[in-house]
Image: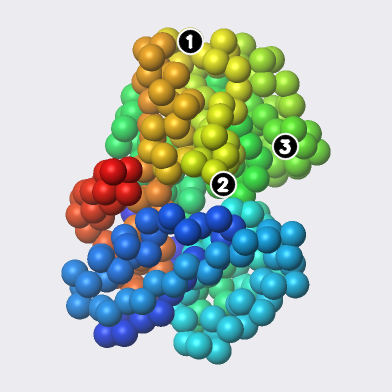
């Protein structure tokens, strides 16, 4: 995976962090610190858990200013702040600008530069798991920050038609118009999941539903069938109710671990200027998941 920022010389001591809501069980600190150690870097990765997302708008500028003042090399940004953070940044990469979402902020010469490794990270995991997947009609649940990044990625992989399902039809429509402008008229927006699933070849789930703190299914199980492939972005738990139900029906599945590792590889390169060992990082991630589940 190629980072979207210029290479920077590695340093021996670094600060990085993650801003999000309900992120206390995130595996990102352990993944980033462990990989940094293999490169001779002493990285401290700090979780910055905003327990009240409603307070995020006045709080985010303070958190970003503090990170800049404290000499952070960068920040990861997760739910629900991937779009809220954009007006607070000094610059955006082409990728982040096109996707309208940021999951990685790099501090460069005192400036905050937003990037997005969600799309490339999702594609990395998806290609490894299902290299021959049928992309004739792909349904994407969720038009938020992660969903937007994945929408770009799946169209770049060659999806013939993408159906974006979101309860906020205006948001889904805005995303589809932006996608069509870049990739041609291949996107349909709807809030009717049953209509979207008719004739679908695959399903991508890109909402928080299924997380340990938000258990459940993002759609009725009756809409699943064995011919579908199903890709999940949630990784804690690694086997969500959606994946468990889909596997029981005979669907080919992709768990959220692939995207978690893929985006972390991209963020590591942006923070350090170094290429992570993908195999080592994924093996570490899988060990962490097992340890946390015991």
Q: Position of residue 132 (x, y in %)?
A: 34, 24
Pick whichever of labels 2 and 1 is earlier in the sequence: 2
Q: Report how many numbered discs are placed on residues in the image.
A: 3
In this rendered view, identify the residue nearer to me: 198 or 184.
Answer: 198
Q: Position of residue 6 (x, y in %)?
A: 41, 73
- State the image quarter where residue 167 is shown: top right
Quarter of the rendering containing residue 266: bottom left
Front of the two marks 3 and 1? 1
Q: The C terminus lies in which quarter of the figure?
A: top left
Residue 20 in sight here: yes
Residue drawn at x 66%, y 40% as measured from the top left: 143
Residue ID for mark 1:
225
The residue tagged with tag 3: helix, strand or loop? Answer: helix
Is residue 191 shown above or below 66? Answer: above
- In the orientation shown, which residue stands out farthest toward the front? 294
Q: Is residue 148 above or below residue 264?
A: above
Please give the name of the residue rendered at 56% of the width and 29% of the height, measured from the top-left corner: 216
* Residue labelled with disc 3: 172
Query: Which mark, by number, is residue 158?
Result: none
Residue 207's image quarter?
Answer: top right
Using the numbered discs, state the Cα–Cα distance from disc 2 to disc 1 in whole angstroms: 25 Å
Q: Nearer the viewer, residue 120 or 268?
A: 268
Residue 276 image position (x, y, % from top left): 27, 62
Distance, label 3 to label 1, CA atoms, is 25 Å
Q: Mark 3, residues whose alpha carbon is within 10 Å: few (<14), some, or many (≥20)?
A: many
- Residue in the image at 77% along x and 37% along y: 168
SS of the residue under disc 2 = helix
Q: Which mark is residue 146?
A: 2
Dot 3 or dot 1, earlier in sequence: 3
């Amino acid at each position: 995976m190629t980072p979207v920022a210029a290479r920077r010389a590695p340093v021996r001591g670094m600060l990085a962090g993650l801003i999000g809501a309900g992120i206390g069980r995130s595996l990102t600190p352990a993944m980033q610190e462990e990989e940094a150690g293999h490169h001779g870097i002493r990285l401290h990765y700090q979780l910055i858990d905003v327990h009240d997302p409603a307070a995020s708008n006045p709080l985010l500028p303070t958190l970003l200013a503090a990170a800049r003042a404290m000499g952070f090399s960068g920040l990861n940004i997760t739910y629900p702040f991937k779009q809220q953070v954009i007006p607070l940044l000094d610059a955006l990469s082409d990728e982040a600008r096109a996707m309208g979402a940021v999951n990685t902020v790099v501090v460069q010469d005192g400036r905050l530069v937003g990037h997005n490794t969600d799309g490339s990270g999702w594609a990395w995991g998806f290609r490894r798991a299902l290299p021959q997947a049928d992309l004739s009609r792909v349904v994407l649940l969720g038009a938020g920050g992660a969903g937007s990044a994945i929408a770009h990625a799946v169209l770049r992989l060659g999806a013939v038609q993408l159906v974006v399902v979101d309860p906020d039809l205006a948001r889904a429509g805005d995303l589809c118009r932006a996608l069509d402008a870049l990739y041609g008229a291949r996107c349909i927006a709807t809030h009717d999941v049953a209509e979207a699933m008719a004739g679908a070849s695959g399903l991508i789930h890109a909402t928080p539903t299924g997380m340990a703190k938000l258990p459940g299914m993002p759609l009725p199980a009756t809409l699943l069938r064995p011919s579908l492939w199903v890709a999940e972005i949630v990784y804690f738990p690694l086997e969500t109710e959606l994946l468990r139900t889909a596997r029981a029906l005979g669907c080919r599945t992709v768990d959220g671990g692939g995207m978690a590792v893929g985006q972390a590889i991209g963020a590591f390169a942006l923070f350090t200027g170094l290429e992570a060992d993908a195999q080592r990082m994924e093996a570490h991630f899988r060990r962490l998941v097992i340890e946390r589940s015991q």
